[in-house]
């Protein structure tokens, strides 16, 4: 085999195969390949083509994940590869773009380097932190295992296995009480993710699996949606929350609101005044920022988010940007921007413009303005809610809009086609194509 | 929640929700939900509808897997859920059909029960054993970890992760020797699976990933296909083996034939007189029968297969059948039947007919006759080989036939459509849709 060209400093992008050329380029490093980080990288393409900068995109995984559809992977409607796209493939044809699969452990601000768990530090001239949010179990680390959340492709597949295995075990469980516990599913947190997850579990149990078993009736599965707050989809207008609540109950989902979780053990959960025996408990409650504030040595707000300047740069260091769920920024009205993918996406594009401007000698940087396209949430049973500000939609219309918008936002035509087929097939047959338990074979897989 | 009807004996099919009715039915138990077992179950549908028997299909997983395409999951062309179908969904609408996800540990012939690792024994009146074959590392248990094989969906995804991570690590590896080892892929066994795997790895490295990296050139990846025998695809006519060998070499694959593996360690493999340093070693060599012979207390042949009567029943016990890769049967000419899915499929249908006949009072059982449709093997680079006896095909024609036949054989229209889209997209763009590393995030995921 002809050996690849030598690579003296492995992880450092400043020494690429194209050698010296790189060293004189302005080095932009992006941490996080989600909506924000990826769009920042794509926004810098022309600057890279014009040889004004190199971009190194660092992520723990090799792909960008379309998180809004993650719950559909967890409930066997889609497979994980359909909502993920390899980061490398998106930047493969852009010279000066590097993808580094690595885990960041900190930032050395004095020496301007990103520190990795494994491998040499990555030097930067401009840094974009787009590390997003992680779920927070309110300090109860012992709850993490018992009530897993949905963040990565691996999470979704593990959750799917757990969900499907619960029915398999119930089918073989002689003790009625244990069987009832196996067939009780609790979702903690009634935001969009929690609502979508509960709705999809209901569809799975009440329609997809209806005829699959002989000793249990999946239609008797109990699905409980808990939230500490007084209503579901709290970020939506009251009227839409009320509609969603009505629809969820019509789908046989028990709503348990104004009930914070106080205890969580091997056999169930204590939510407010109620004890719910359940084997499958899923976490869709609080999130917090990744340790970006600690990395930067700045004070985060109470949720750990990093307050930034109107142009998303770090106060006191214009060459560091924090975007998306890791950052805290208010809109013109002084209202905090929501933790939505669309905000992260627009901020990524914004900082790309700011940086490109600087590299082209146009240092004046405009403040970030969020273009609010509104928000959508799927409920299930062919209904959803949509709030576009100027108009609010519910039911089938909103469901159709939700589907169209999410198909449109998916990356790559193939993923759109595959998703479309899966959805149409599911809509026609109630079947869910990905009803596969992939954990190692065995009765307790 | 309304509790499901009580279920005194959990795992026993003889007590279903329909109660007494079942107890008087003839109980057919099938072990294994592959080509053979599934087709036996489907073949007994009318007997079940006529209330002549109940069928319990036992499998360690919850799905039937289309093994011929498993190598495409391992090489990121398809996702695992696309080639798998839930067993329950295939028998959901057939009264008297039960699916039991459990691992069998033995058979109690005297008391006519199947013993499970976990759960109560399953009594049978007629038993069909379709447990297939497992890979054999020639007694080198220490090789299993180092050179994994491809049998389950979990295997395929693990192999895909390993393959893709090798390139990611090579990209970051400063030491040229280590990098070369990371970019060397050894496939042991040049049967159809080995050839298809080697060919797909070559396509992945030489076309799909061509532009993805900056410090390595995936086109320099070294792919070695080893076999103890003198030629690739030994089960095919010499002429087709020769063609396949030529094509594989044209794809940059090193053939190392007549070279049995004598050593396998952390840094490479010793095949014949050659030492190959490699990180990724994949096993596609010998298979052996699952422990069916031991379960039955009979003598298997030298490969552990159970010799059966011409009608696939066990000598001395007409109520037990062994089919597919677990059984040893000769064709009319006295030649052993090959270990092909088509043989298992036809044997499954055959024993279903025999059993249905007996239940209908037509005990005379015809011997099994294998209808040989020929064999196909994909090479890659738009070429394959096909041997239909009356005609032999190579190149694009065989490639097209291979694709059409495999699409046709896939279960469920959705899977056909999704596979078709993935193939067309790959053919148009060289992209492989499932290039996702799903192992837990992290540099050494």
Image (cartoon, coloured by chain):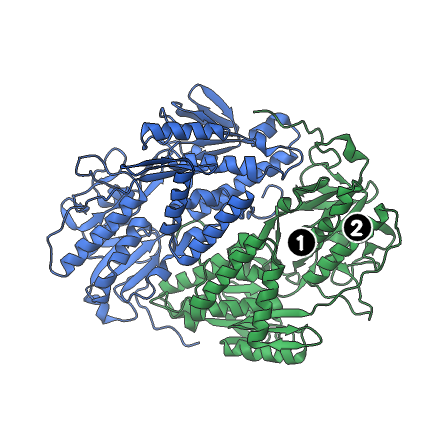
Chain colours: A green, B blue
Q: Is residue A418 left or right of residue B361?
A: right
Residue A184's place in the image compared with B178, above or below, is: below
Chain of the residue displaying label 2: A
Helix, strand or loop under label 2: helix
Residue B27 on image: x %, y %? 22, 60
Name the residue: 14% across, 49% down. Answer: B366
Residue A187's place in the image compared with A79, above or below, is: below
Name the residue: 43% across, 58% down. Answer: B414
Residue B158 on image: x %, y %? 49, 44
Is residue A444 visible from the viewing direction of this image? no
Chain of the residue displaying label 1: A
Q: Residues within 10 Å of mark 2 (few under 14, many from 20)?
A: some
Q: Residue furthest top?
A: B273
Q: Is residue B309 left or right of residue B342?
A: left
Q: Residues within 10 Å of mark 1 (few under 14, many from 20)?
A: many
Q: Nearer the viewer, residue A422 or B311?
A: A422
Q: Identify residue for label 2.
A: A296
Helix, strand or loop under label 1: loop
How many marks do you count on the picture? Answer: 2
Residue A64's place in the image compared with A404, above or below, is: above
- The numbered disc on residue B129 is none
- The numbered disc on residue A34 is 1
* Label 1 in the same subunit as label 2: yes
Name the residue: 69% across, 60% down. Answer: A288
Q: Is residue B227 left or right of residue A408?
A: left
């Amino acid at each position: 085999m002809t050996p690849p060209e030598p690579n003296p400093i492995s992880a450092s992008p400043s020494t690429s195969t194209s050698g010296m050329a790189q060293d004189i380029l302005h080095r932009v490093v992006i941490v996080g390949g989600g909506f924000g980080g990826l769009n920042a990288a794509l926004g810098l393409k022309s600057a890279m083509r014009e040889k004004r900068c190199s971009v190194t995109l660092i992520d723990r995984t090799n792909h960008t994940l379309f998180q809004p559809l993650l719950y559909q992977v967890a409930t066997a409607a889609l497979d994980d590869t359909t909502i993920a796209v390899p980061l490398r493939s998106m930047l493969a044809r852009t010279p000066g773009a590097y993808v580094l699969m690595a885990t960041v452990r900190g930032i050395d601000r004095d020496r301007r380097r990103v520190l990795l768990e494994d491998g040499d530090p990555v030097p930067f001239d401009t840094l974009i932190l787009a590390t997003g949010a992680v779920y927070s179990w309110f300090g109860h680390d012992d709850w993490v295992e018992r009530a897993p959340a949905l963040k990565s492709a691996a999470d979704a597949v593990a959750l799917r296995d757990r969900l499907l295995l619960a029915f398999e075990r119930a089918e073989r469980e002689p003790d009625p009480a244990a069987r009832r516990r196996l067939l009780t599913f609790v979702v903690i947190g009634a935001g969009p993710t929690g609502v979508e997850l509960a709705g999809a579990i209901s569809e799975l149990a009440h329609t997809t699996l209806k005829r699959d078993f002989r000793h249990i009736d999946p239609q008797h599965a109990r699905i409980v949606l808990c939230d500490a707050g007084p209503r579901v989809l709290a970020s939506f207008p009251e009227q839409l929350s009320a509609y969603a609540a009505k629809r969820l109950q019509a789908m046989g989902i028990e709503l348990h609101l104004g009930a914070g979780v106080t205890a969580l053990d091997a056999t169930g959960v204590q939510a407010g005044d109620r004890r719910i025996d359940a084997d499958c408990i899923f976490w869709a409650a609080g999130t917090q920022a990744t340790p970006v504030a600690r990395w930067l040595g700045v004070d985060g707000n109470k949720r750990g988010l990093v307050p930034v300047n109107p142009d998303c740069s770090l106060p006191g260091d214009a060459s560091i940007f924090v975007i998306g769920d890791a950052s805290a920024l208010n809109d013109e009205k002084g209202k905090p921007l929501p933790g939505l993918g669309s905000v992260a996406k627009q901020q990524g594009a914004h900082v790309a413009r700011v940086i490109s401007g600087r590299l082209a000698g146009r240092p004046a940087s405009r403040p970030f303005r969020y273009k609010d396209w509104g928000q959508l949430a799927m409920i299930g049973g062919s209904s959803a809610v949509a709030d576009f500000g100027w108009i609010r939609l519910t039911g089938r219309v909103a469901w159709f809009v939700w589907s169209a918008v999410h198909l449109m936002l998916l990356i790559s035509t193939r993923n759109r086609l595959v998703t479309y087929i899966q959805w149409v097939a599911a809509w026609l047959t109630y079947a869910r194509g990905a009803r596969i338990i992939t954990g190692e074979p065995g009765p307790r897989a």
